[in-house]
Amino acid sequence: MTVQESVGKSAADLVLGFVNTRATGNGDPELMGDAEALRRWIEGAGLGSEDLKVTNADAAVARELRDALVALLLSHVGVEECEGGVAEAESHMRRTAELYPLMAVVTEAGCELRPSQRGVPGAFASIVAGVAHATAAGLWPRMKMCRNMPCHVSFLDKTRNSSGLYCSAACSSQVSMRSYRQRQKTGQVSTAPLEDHSDHLDPSSAH
């Protein structure tokens, strides 16, 4: 693995970890509901110190950033939950990048994007930098939300042709079974084997 690939993978893990703090239909709890929860996540991600000052307003900003990322990752599996949602998410990401700018740090080893601010603003900028580094490594199109509606957990698609739609074989089977039962109700049952899109997924990125 090259340095760029290693940096990209770490960046993708950071962004996916941030996205996966939201509550899901699988029973996963909200992990960014207030100031204390956001502070714990920032510290756990290594983006802040123990004396970090966080407010409930910061937590609200974090959830809005997370929602924008969710919309973009859903688009990677062909889902747009509301009309214009992707465009709105892209606009939100541009505003975030303007509010929490990055600086290019050039060294003998290369160039790295780092937050130009500290504290909570620096943590938000780190998420934007994570997207940039993942993109540079070719991983952004492979960062997706599980297409299984009750799940909607983010994951890194490791299929050869980036065709994965679900975070796990279990989610793929649930969707296939729901589709089969729906066809049964409408009298359109097929005898073809159920399709599984979960090959080569990265289970460490889900849940």
Image (tube, rainbow, N blue to C red):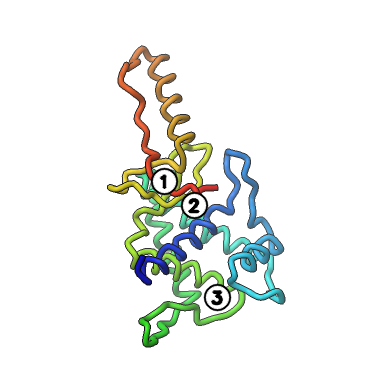
The residue positioned farthest toward the front in the image shown: 1
Q: Amino acid at mark 3?
A: Gly
Q: Is residue 48 left or right of residue 105?
A: right
48 vs 18, left or right, is right
User: Does residue 142 show up?
Assistant: yes
Q: Secondary structure at mark 3?
A: helix
Q: Which residue is mark 1?
A: 201
Report whether residue 85 is seen.
no
Q: Residues within 10 Å of mark 2 (few under 14, many from 20)?
A: many
Q: Position of residue 119 (x, y in %)?
A: 61, 76
Q: Position of residue 62 (x, y in %)?
A: 57, 62
- Label 3 Cα crowd, 10 Å radius (few <14 / some 14-19 / many 20+): some
**Distance (Cα) linking label 1 and label 2:** 9 Å
Q: Which residue is mark 2?
A: 205
Mark 1 to mark 3: distance in Å? Answer: 31 Å
- Quadrant hosting residue 131: bottom left
Give SS at disc 1.
loop
The amino acid type, in three-letter code, at marker 1 is Leu
In this rendering, the answer to whether 147 lies above or below 58 is above
Q: Nearer the viewer, mark 1 or mark 3?
A: 1
User: Which of marks 3 and 2 precedes in the sequence?
Assistant: 3
User: Cα distance, mark 2 to mark 3?
Assistant: 23 Å
Quarter of the view holding residue 91? bottom left
Badges 1 and 2: C-beta atoms under 8 Å apart? yes
User: Depth check: 112 or 58 in front?
Assistant: 112
Q: Is residue 83 above or below residue 141?
A: above
**Residue indicated by mark 3:** 122
Q: Residue at x 70, y 74 (%)?
A: 50
